[in-house]
Amino acid sequence: MTNEEGKKSGRGMTSGASALAAGLVLLLSLFLMFGGREKTDVPAVSEEKLSAEEPEASKEEASAEEPEISKEELQEENIPESKSPETELQGMKVVEGENDRTTFGIDVSRFQEDIDWKQVAESGVDFVMVRIGCRKSVSGTIMEDDCARYNLREAAANGIHLGAYFFSTAVNEEEAEEEARWVCDFLRGYPITYPVVYNCEGFQEEYSRQHDLTVEERSVLADVFLDKIEEAGYTGMFYASKGELEDNLLWNTDMLEQRYRIWVAQYLPGTYPEISNPEYTGSYVMWQYTDQGTVPGIRTVVDLNVAYFGYDEAASAVISEVAE
């Protein structure tokens, strides 16, 4: 091959390469201009378009759908509902002339026989709780205590403040109301300063007419009795032993101690004033600390009590009647 031919051949190759390059550039340009159109069939959605087509709920809207509960609202929701006036327990009766002086007393019945009340008064006894009657455990008959009138009259005549108690075996509300009316009728004319007490024992014995009553049923009967007693102008009190009262075992103590004064019985190895209080941790205002006491003027043993309250003076006789 001659040099001239080589030059021509080289020029020819150069021209062909240039044309090829130009063609490639043209194809690339066309691809860049129109190649993306294939994507227009499934267009990409921008974040703005997504927000417009499927709007994201704002914080305010989210709050409207699922409102946040503030701390204050949460606390209010957790506050228990207050009791309506119909279900709230009434408060304990306030007694005019009652003070916080500790006083000493006895409780008596016909079992203490004839008592020399002058000697009893001289021994330093401040008050006496007199059993005035009972309802029989089997027959249900209301009976007056044989010594009640004598004890009330002579104790008062010797300057001893009077309280009273009734031994109940009521089995329904009608009987509890009957007992309360009987008590108020009996006490009319006597200066009752200390409380009038509901006493109920022996109900677990098979022979007792109260044997099948529940704790709540018995407690309601005590409440009915004492409510009528206070309605007549006296101060109501509930008597029971420490073991019966604790943990609402045999009485609805929570209810009774909020409405009435509690007289608790517990006999410990020591007595008052060596021991100043019973071991009972509930509410109480009087403690029967022994059933083996001795007092001048009484031939038998007698129950001794300390009351953590006293009165400025003896009460006047109550003459009101219990409503039917």
Image (tube, grey):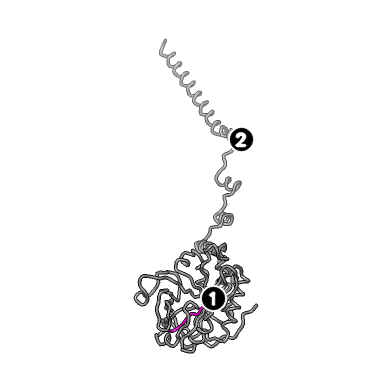
Q: Nearer the viewer, residue 8 or 58?
A: 58
Which amino acid, mark 2? Asp
Residue 231, quarter of the rendered image: bottom right
- Residue 235 vs 44, above or below: the answer is below
Seen in the picture, residue 85 relative to 60 is either above or below; the reply is below
Where is residue 139, by image quadrant?
bottom right
- Of residues 2 and 88, which is closer to you in this image? 88
Q: Which residues are the magenta region?
A: 125-131
Taking 230 as reference, is 304 left or right?
Answer: left
| Residue occupying image coordinates x 50% and y 72% | 257
| Residue marked by disc 2 | 41
Q: CA distance from mark 1 to mark 2?
A: 101 Å
In the rendering, at what x and y percent does residue 196 appear? Answer: 52, 78
The local secondary structure at tag 2 comes to: helix
Q: Which residue does the image show at 42% across and 69% down from the upper left?
A: 280
Local SS, label 1: strand
**Residue 130 among those drawn in magenta:** yes
In the rendered image, residue 109 lying in the magenta stretch gets the answer no
Q: Residue at x 61, y 80 (%)?
A: 322
Instruction: State the image coordinates of residue 124 (x, y, percent, origin top left).
Output: 40, 85
- Amino acid carrying label 1: it is Phe
Tell which of 83 and 212 is nearer to you.
212
The secondary structure that dominates the magenta segment is strand
Q: State the residue lying farthest toward the left.
A: 274
Residue projecting furthest to the right: 324
* Disc 1: which residue: 166
Say the numbered circle drawn on residue 28: none
